[in-house]
Structures are given as C-alpha cells and as structure tokens.
Image (cartoon, rainbow, N blue to C red):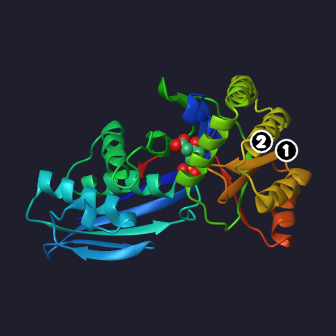
Amino acid sequence: MTSKASAPGKVILFGEHFVVYGVKAILCAIDKRITVTAEKIPEDVISIKSTVGNLKAIKNKPITEIDAPLRPFYYLANKIIKKYEPDSGIQITVDSEIPLGVGLGSSSACCVASAAAISGIFEKIPKDEILKLAIDAEKTIFPNTSGADCTVCTYGGIMQYDKQNGHQKLDYKPNFHFVIANSKVEHSTKEVVSKVEQFKEKNEEKFSQMCKEESDLIDGVFAFLENNDLKKIGTSIIKNQEYLEFIGVSNEKLREMIELANESSFGSKITGAGGGGCIIALADETNLENTISQLQKNNYECFSAKIDFKGLDTF
Ligand code: PMV
C-alpha cells in the first residue's frame, strides 16, 4: 500500500522579526509543494530518500542519533509505525518544488506531508491531528517553533499569527502573484534573530516605536487584502521593508534585489529572517513577466508563485 500527501510552502507577507516581540504577522501558503510518498516495506527498517539526504536505520533509535534534516521524517515514521504496526518497515520518498532552507517553509511542508502520508498508510486522520504530529516532528529540529509555518502549510490560504492569540485563518482571496527571488546567501534564522535582539537592547525606545508602527501598518493591510488593492498592499510591503532595513536584517545584495524588483512590481521585501534567503515582490498580470525578466537579467534566480488555498492534500 502506497500513501501520498503534499503540502505547500509559505512566505511571510508581513511582520517577521516584530512577531518575536508580540506583533501580528501575516503568512501565505504558496503553490509550490513538497510531496511525500510512504509505503510499507518487507525489511524491518525506516528508509528515507530525499534531496536533503538518504537514510536507512533500524527503528527506535534515540532521535539525537539521526542527522538533523532527516529527524522529522524518522520521528514520524517511528511514532506512527509503533502505534499501528510495530513489526512493519517503512520507506519514505520526498520530492520538492520548494528551494530548501531559504525561509520558504520547506521543513514545515515536509513535516505536514510526511505526517499525512505515513499515517495515511494505516488510517486517514483529520487535518488538526496531522498538524499536531507535524509540529511535534518540527520540534525535533526547531524546539522553539511557534507552529505558525506548519499551520499555514496544513490549511493553506492566508493566516495571521501572534504570540498571544496564536493562529487565525483569514478568508480573503486576493488575486496576485509573488515573484520570489533567492539571494543564494546562506543565513541562520537564529543568528539574525539574535542580532535583532541586540539591536533592540541598544535601542529600546526606538524599537518599541517600530513595533507600534509595524503593528499599525499590518492592521491597515487587512482591508487592502480584502479589496485586492495591490497598489496599497505594495506600498505597505515597501514600508515594511524600511522597518526591516532599520533593524539591520538586510544587506547589500538584498537591497539590490529589492531596488530592482521595486522598479516593476507593486513592492518587494525580505521574507523570513533576512541576512540572506529570499525576497518577495508583489505582481499581477501587468508586471509579472517584466519583474521576472529584470531579476533574471541580473542573474537572480527567481520564480513566480500564487497563494495556495488548498493546504495539505492527500491522494
Ligand atoms: O526565515 P523563516 O521563514 O524561518 O522566518 C523567521 C521569522 C522570524 O520572525 C525572523 C523568526 C520567528 O521565529 O518568528
């Protein structure tokens, strides 16, 4: 029996970094997916084949003995087999349309799709239970995860998240394209978050004023999303990028990409931690091709994506 599931990646549309200090963030699922195929095998092992590495290991090993990128897969396989069929072996194959490790939710999408594909061999379980399994799996590599990424990868669409109130799905169905460009500069979310913390400690008053401004900016965006007002969403994106610049998470390469993307799109900004990783630019049919070709002419790797409204899919 083969069981397959796919889950979308994500971008942070507004609020990264400020969300760490209690401000609301807005996340969107994107129509680029991770697909996981799981099947029972006669051999009594857990076997994983993925672009982040391969593994063939006996069951019930301590999770710390598994290489970090493969931990969530192993954790889920081991846990789910134990529950349904402890004598069974399992093989997991991962296919990805999402560039890995650049803040586009690849790890969360892997956790969500794996939880659904592996449990699907034995039983079809509801999305909220898949989500719980996926968040536990993601905690084997990111112990402090808020769960926001896994949540948007499970349910799709647009979601708001803040530390106090958790997640809330937004029912807006705006119709736009993202152009996502990869700086190819490696970054560590942990290091950039700690850089922002240092900035905050040195500039307490300014930082709390910026949190307030970011919060007001995001409160204004909901109406623009509801009305599909791309010009106003774009202007808000540009404003959000100014705040990200100010707290020191941008760099020369990201600035160059953003400046270029702003010439043709409605607005662009870093998505995720910054320091490297990706930028997003907002576009529609009138400026999509131009935005992509300008970035490509300057040798930036980029692709277009739309919001994914489906979330986790099993088949
Ligand atoms: O780069 P990503 O997608 O993992 O996003 C990091 C978002 C931060 O706000 C910078 C950190 C966080 O924990 O929210």
Q: Do the residues under discs 2 and 1 have CB atoms within 8 angstroms?
A: no
The residue indicated by pointer 2 is 246
x, y percent for residue 237: 77, 39
Q: Is residue 247 left or right of residue 283?
A: left
As drawn, 199 above or below 298: above
Mark 2 or 1, nearer chain start: 2
Q: Nearer the viewer, residue 63 or 209?
A: 209
Structural distance between the alpha carbons of marks 2 and 1: 21 Å
Question: Looking at this rendering, what residue extends furthest in the left direction?
Answer: 87
Q: Which mark is residue 20?
A: none
Which label sits in the foreground, 2 or 1?
2
In the image, what residue occupies the spot 38% across and 51% down? Answer: 138
**Residue farthest along the front direction in this orientation:** 202
Residue nearer the viewer, 150 or 6: 150
Q: Secondary structure at mark 2?
A: helix
In this view, 29 is above or below 55: above
Residue type at numbered disc 2:
Phe
Q: Amino acid at mark 1?
A: Phe
Q: Residue at x 70, y 34 (%)?
A: 203
Image position of 222 with respect to 89: above or below? above
Mark sitting on residue 266: 1
Above or below, 192 relative to 168: below
**Looking at mark 2, is its residue's CB closer than 8 Å to ligand 1?**
no
